[in-house]
Image: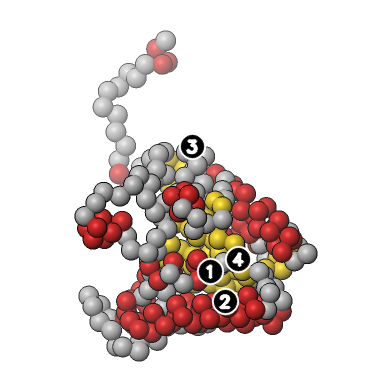
Amino acid sequence: MAWFKRNTKGISTSTNEKKEAPDGVWNKCPNCKKALHYTEQAENKHVCMYCNYHLRIGSKEYFEILFDNNAFVELFPNLTSGDPLSFVDTKSYKDRIVESTKKTGLKDAIRAAHGQIDQQDLVVACMDFNFIGGSMGSVVGEKIARSVDYCIEHKIPFLMISKSGGARMMEAAFSLMQMAKTSAKLALLAKAKIPYISLLTDPTTGGVTASYAMLGDVNIAEPGALIGFAGPRVIKETIKKDLPKGFQTSEFVLEHGFLDFIVDRRELKKKLSSFIHMMNN
């Protein structure tokens, strides 16, 4: 068994000879803490294969999951935020936008696209949490409004995928105005009898929950998503009481009648296709 034994103790590898895994190849599940390979994650729709935890993903991944052959036309891609208040906190709002754009490759916290799902036309507007916490600013409201107009003009169903920390404080009242603006546009969509499906993902909070995220003809959510207006800590400090177990999870919200159902991301395309087919006939 000499071949099995280490004859020299204290073997070490010099720093310049060590090899590290490239960034982005491995990830760790936030729930069960097990290592996940990116290729396996993508094949499993970014759901942990060990505990079924739904990892946070952005518009790029949702478009890959939903659109046939990942083929789509992006709508209104060049809209960018202004700085109406010349806002400055730890840094200026303009600098924060430039920094977020470089970091994420996105123009703002939402992308809209027209494609097909099982050969049925669909417009999808999807929020990206990595861009300033998915906050709702004037660009988010404008893209949703223009997407609704596009759906009305072309008679196409609309899917909104929400993932947001709420209104963007750097735009103050300009951000809050988007709640009324998007709600009014969705009323026009309903008047035109065009289906609107709202998908709430982790997290969906603040003014987004108080407006377009909860106005769907069908409101659905991913398992375990945080859904609420104010955060649990703020509510607990306000009412001075402990909150129920699972408070503000999608399961809790479903139990209390604010959702129609919860859908596993691996079944999302199939479910949406069935709904679109049913609503169009």
Question: Element under label 3?
Answer: loop
Amino acid type of the residue that numbered disc 4 sits on in the rendered structure: Asp
Inter-mark Cα distance, 1 to 4: 7 Å
The relative height of residue 41 versus residue 166 in the rendered view (above or below) is above
Q: Is residue 166 left or right of residue 114?
A: left
Question: Element under label 2?
Answer: helix
The relative height of residue 122 versus residue 152 in the rendered view (above or below) is above
Inter-mark Cα distance, 1 to 2: 8 Å
Amino acid type of the residue that numbered disc 2 sits on in the rendered structure: Leu
Q: Are marks 1 and 2 in contact (CB under 8 Å)?
A: yes
Which label's residue is closer to the chain start, 1 or 2? 2
Q: Nearer the viewer, residue 160 or 96?
A: 160
- Residue at numbered disc 1: 215
Q: Is residue 11 left or right of residue 39?
A: left
Amino acid type of the residue that numbered disc 1 sits on in the rendered structure: Leu
- Residue at numbered disc 3: 50
Inter-mark Cα distance, 2 to 3: 39 Å
- Residue at numbered disc 4: 217
Which label's residue is closer to the chain start, 1 or 3? 3
Q: At 71% across and 64% down in the image, what residue appears?
A: 279
Which label's residue is closer to the chain start, 3 or 4? 3
Q: At 56% across and 55% down in the image, what residue appears?
A: 260
Image quarter where the N terminus lies is top left
Q: Are marks 2 and 3 in contact (CB under 8 Å)?
A: no
The local crowd at label 3, few if under 14, some if 14 to 19, many if 20 or more residues have their Cα within 10 Å, is: few
